[in-house]
Image (spheres, rainbow, N blue to C red):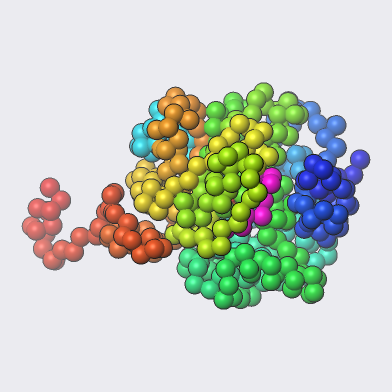
Amino acid sequence: MQPDLVCFNPACRARFGITEVLYNCTTCGGLLEAAYDFSGINASELKTTWRERRMSNDPLCQSGVWRYRELFPFLAPEDEHNIITLREGNTPLLKAPRAAEYGGLAEITFKHQGFNPTGSFKDNGMTAGAAQARRLGMKRVACVSTGNTSASMAAYASAGGLEPLIFIPNGNISYGKLAQALEYGAKTFQVEANFDQILALVRVLAERLGIYLLNSINPFRIEGQKSIVIEMMDQLDWQVPDWIVLPGGNLGNVSAFGKGLREMYKLGFIDRLPRLGVVQAAGSSPFYEYMLDGGKTPFHAQQHPETLATAIKIGDPVSWPKAQFEIETTNGVVERADEQEIADAKAVIGACGIGCEPASAATLAGIRKLTAAGVIHRNASVVAILTGNVLKDPDYIYRYHTGELKAPDNSPIRATFGNKPVLVPNDADRIAELIS
Ligand SMILES: *Cc1c(COP(=O)(O)O)cnc(C)c1O
């Protein structure tokens, strides 16, 4: 049986060919997902194969995404030459005792997706989306992005001979991310509109000019992002943690995690499902609001999302129906953290020698609240996903540590764990005094 694109809406489930250029179901407008015939899969044999591939010099085996390609076989073997790999994935699991204590846990493990080639988990999905673009014979690819998607898409498109077109909200992006997009050669348009408005604009342009869209609605990016939980389980020797906690913006990543976990469970790679915890920024938390009553009232987009954690500043997350399904299936929870909570959690992660960008720190801030509320038990095994690299947003860091950081409403953020540079005279005695 061929892989298919299938409408995610349970009342529709319309099927489409895997090479049709579609972002939504043409019958009901629902989200699409890739569906496979997994009947040949043998979990224990594949676990061994995947371990052996870590020793290989074959680029696809070295990739922490494509090493696991049997669980997202949307490319026929004869199409695999379309894959562009920058050796994405291969991100570490890191213990962090001080962060655990701050989060109210006996122990915490961070899976740091900021170790990716362009510094965020977007690379796990982008290598898959870019491969599909090349397989379809596309020449141009585009995305709307708060930053990391554009950095990632620019790199993979340029590495694969595609022309990257990037649309960003004017004045709402960190310099680290914009700089990457420019350096990787993307044609970059800053538009006077918010993220959600620009997404609508780009969908019109994509249709008109035959550009392939690599936003997180793209089902192949979701397939690539499944590799984050597959690699995590491989690294944990298939021992399932109690919780996996991640930040939520457009909610593509939690959708990918849920799908990957369900598939691994069904195919016998793991013997239970972990619970998923999604943390949103309080100023940009439409999914949190929606799930407060279990998702019974209609979903309301937020018109003016505000947070310094720009990677999760999204008022109208496209993947919320999938995210709702995955939260319900895993008995998960949705939490929110305010600007002060995110900033302090971020400094704690930094002080562990690990570091991350603001959106990533929402995980630890949310965990601290969930343990205090008794939702996550102190002795639970918890893997928190650090989604982006510490250097993505250096301006934020400097301002926090010097007490100059301000929330979007201009209220000051306290430098609870501030670490200011100290101005000293060129005088050894004086400096020695200050050190001791
Ligand atoms: C994209 C991104 C997120 C949000 O992920 P979604 O899939 O949109 O929910 C969180 N953190 C970072 C660093 C990101 O780049």
Residue 294, position in %: x, y? 60, 38
What residue is drawn where x is 13% and y is 57%? 431
Residue 365, position in %: x, y? 42, 43
Instruction: Give the residues drawn in magenta, as a range.
Output: 314-323
Q: Nearer the viewer, residue 129 or 189?
A: 189
Magenta residues: mostly which secondary structure?
loop
Task: Confirm whether the magenta stretch covers residue 125.
Answer: no
Q: Nearer the viewer, residue 80 or 139?
A: 139
What residue is drawn where x is 44% and y is 28%? 374
- Of all residues shown, which one is farthest toward the right? 1
Give the quadrant of residue 315: bottom right
Give the quadrant of residue 334: top right
Give above or below for 242 relative to 206: above
Residue 419, position in %: x, y? 27, 54
Give above or below for 304 relative to 317: below
Question: On the rendered structure, is 78 left or right of 288?
Answer: right
Is residue 380 visible to the viewer in this orientation of the structure? yes
Is residue 59 visible to the viewer in this orientation of the structure? no
Of the 4 image quadrants, the one containing the N terminus is top right
Give above or below for 70 relative to 426: above
Question: On the rendered structure, is 336 left or right of 11?
Answer: left
